[in-house]
Image (spheres, helix red, strand yellow):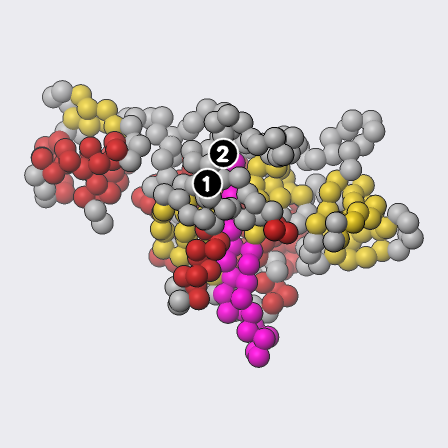
Amino acid sequence: MKTSERVLEILEKSAGSCISGEELAKTLDISRNSVWKAVQTLIGEGFEIEAAPHRGYRFASCNDIISKSAIAEAIDPDKRSFFEIEIRESVTSTNTVLKELASNGEREGHVLIALSQTAGKGRVGRSFYSPKGSGVYFSLLLRPALSPNDTALITCVAAVALCLALKETLSVDTCIKWVNDVYFKNKKICGILTEASLDLNFNSVEYAVLGVGINIYPPEGGFPSDIQEVAGSLVSVRRPFAQSRIIGRFLSEFYTLYFDFDPYKISSIYRKFNFTTGKKIDVISKGAKRPATALAIDDRCRLIVRYEDTGEQDILHAGEISIRHSKEGEDSEGR
């Protein structure tokens, strides 16, 4: 661990209190000059650290910089060793980069976090807007001992884990639009994309990369015009360690459901957060829309629908839907 990272870890744990340079130097067994250089490095990376004469250094309470130590602190102690955290300034797409690492033998549990993405990936070939400072963008590498059919549930596990994590960290109530979009106050605040490499000879999964993008704060200048009616954010005022804590709590919640893999339990929790059932929807396939009613979510998190043109029922394993707004103006996009 770099000296600056070691200094940051101590300052984070003592947020709000001053620590003298002498105390930091003694704790880390380094010179006071090395402490000063480490603090300057952290300030250069965007951390707000106050220096008070004769009192020392204090980690400003408004800091919400993503850091390994803050993420680790938010993960349950017995789960931390599974995860290997890597943070990069900017990547094309965390999913794209992590798939390359997976192909080269990277271990399960590797988490790649980017402060921004230049080509964030969404579903069905769409992009995911990923500016620096407003959201968290990360991917998790998995090597699941699951069948391809069960692996499809990983996306649902992630959606549930995120709703639980946001409740814990920000005290907000979010909900899920089938299959993988998380909503808050009628706006989409998270997209989830799972990509897998299959071994067709053994009908097994070589690896799966789970990508998560969350809009925490409103982006500077607002969302682009093509998504501003749909996209939203969770909070308007920056909160200390919020981004790191959200990532850490998500990883803990995901770990529990992933390693205690029970499709019936997963679907039961998933249904509690899902707001799609009972809604009038359009099932979208190859650009065409087919009106239907969302009837229920089954024990594999599949969506049961009834088409309006024929009255026949169908079970959607995956795909894309849109929810039609009611004429009465009632809430049709979640709470």
From the viewer's perspective, is residue 13 above or below residue 142? above
Residue 124 picture location, percent across and down:
64, 52
Question: What type is the residue that disc 1 sits on?
Answer: Val
Residue 4 horizontal side relative to residue 142, left or right:
left
Magenta extent: 194-216
Residue 18 horizontal side relative to residue 169, left or right:
left
* Quarter assignment of residue 30: top left
Q: Is residue 160 visible?
A: no
Which residue is found at the position 61% from the left and 58% from the top?
153
Question: What type is the residue that disc 2 sits on?
Answer: Ile
* Quarter assignment of residue 183: top right
Residue 218 horizontal side relative to residue 85, left or right:
right
Residue 332 horizontal side relative to residue 206, left or right:
right
Judge whether residue 212 is colored magenta: yes
Q: Report which residue position mark 2 lands on.
A: 216
Circles 1 and 2: CB distance less than 8 Å?
yes
Q: Secondary structure at mark 2?
A: loop
Judge whether residue 195 is colored magenta: yes
Which residue is found at the position 57% from the left and 45% from the top?
127
Q: Secondary structure at mark 1?
A: strand
